[in-house]
Amino acid sequence: MNERIKKAESKMNKSVDRLVGEFAAVRAGRANPSILDKVMVDYYGVPTPINQMAAVSVSESRILLIQPWDVSTLKAIEKALLTSDIGITPTNDGKVIRLVFPQPTEEKRKELCKEIKKMGEETKVAVRAIRRDAIDDIKKMKKDGEITEDDQKDLENETQKLTDKFCKNIDSLVSEKEKEVMSI
């Protein structure tokens, strides 16, 4: 496999990995610690991720338990959760914080599915942009005389097959996530 195609494949993998990460943060009614990945706590003036300040665990299917290692940070963590965009009000009992995830309505689930499809489409656009750049590189190689016309066609076909494979993978990830959201 050509070095440029390997580079394109690596970039496509990164795009798909980013999509998987975004899907993990989609709140679908189940407690998922990854929803807190983007929440930063002001810890002595330094923005710090919650998972570096506390043990985050799922106590029940819809309850997330946040147990800080230093109890004095409880208020700061609670404040960060309240100001974040996760949309869940934390309950603080003085030792731990509980986040109770409400069961999403049918309307909310359909909205989440639209969001999931949009994320999938954005990732496909990114994959196609990577393909376009790879094909431009291949055409430049042909123009510079580095490869023959037959090699150019072969490399372009290989790049297209790789793109099709990734788009198919993205479609399957989107449909799996939609099933998960709708089955709650």
Image (spheres, helix red, strand yellow):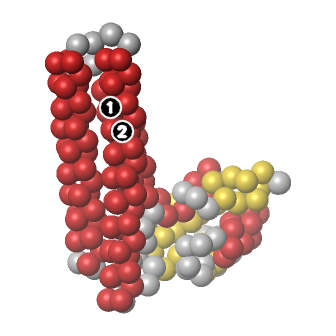
Q: Which residue is mark 2?
A: 132
Given residues 3 and 76, the one toward you in this image is 3
Image position of 63 with respect to 172: above or below: below
Image position of 179 with respect to 4: above or below: below
As shown in the figure, which amino acid type bears the numbered disc 1?
Ile
User: Does residue 54 appear in the picture of this structure?
Assistant: no
Residue drawn 20% across the image and 45% down it: 164
Q: Which mark is residue 135?
A: 1
Discs 2, 1 touching: Cβ within 8 Å: yes
Disc 1 secondary structure class: helix
Residue 100 lies, in percent from the top left, at 49, 80
Residue drawn 18% across the image and 37% down it: 161
User: Does residue 42 appear in the picture of this structure?
Assistant: yes
Given residues 180 and 1, the one toward you in this image is 1
The image quadrant where one finds the C terminus is: bottom left
Is disc 1 surrounded by few (<14), some (14 to 19) or many (20+) residues within 10 Å? many
Residue drawn 19% across the image and 26% down it: 153
The image quadrant where one finds the N terminus is: top left
As shown in the figure, which amino acid type bears the numbered disc 2?
Arg
109 sits left or right of 63 in the view: left
Residue 92 lies, in percent from the top left, at 64, 78
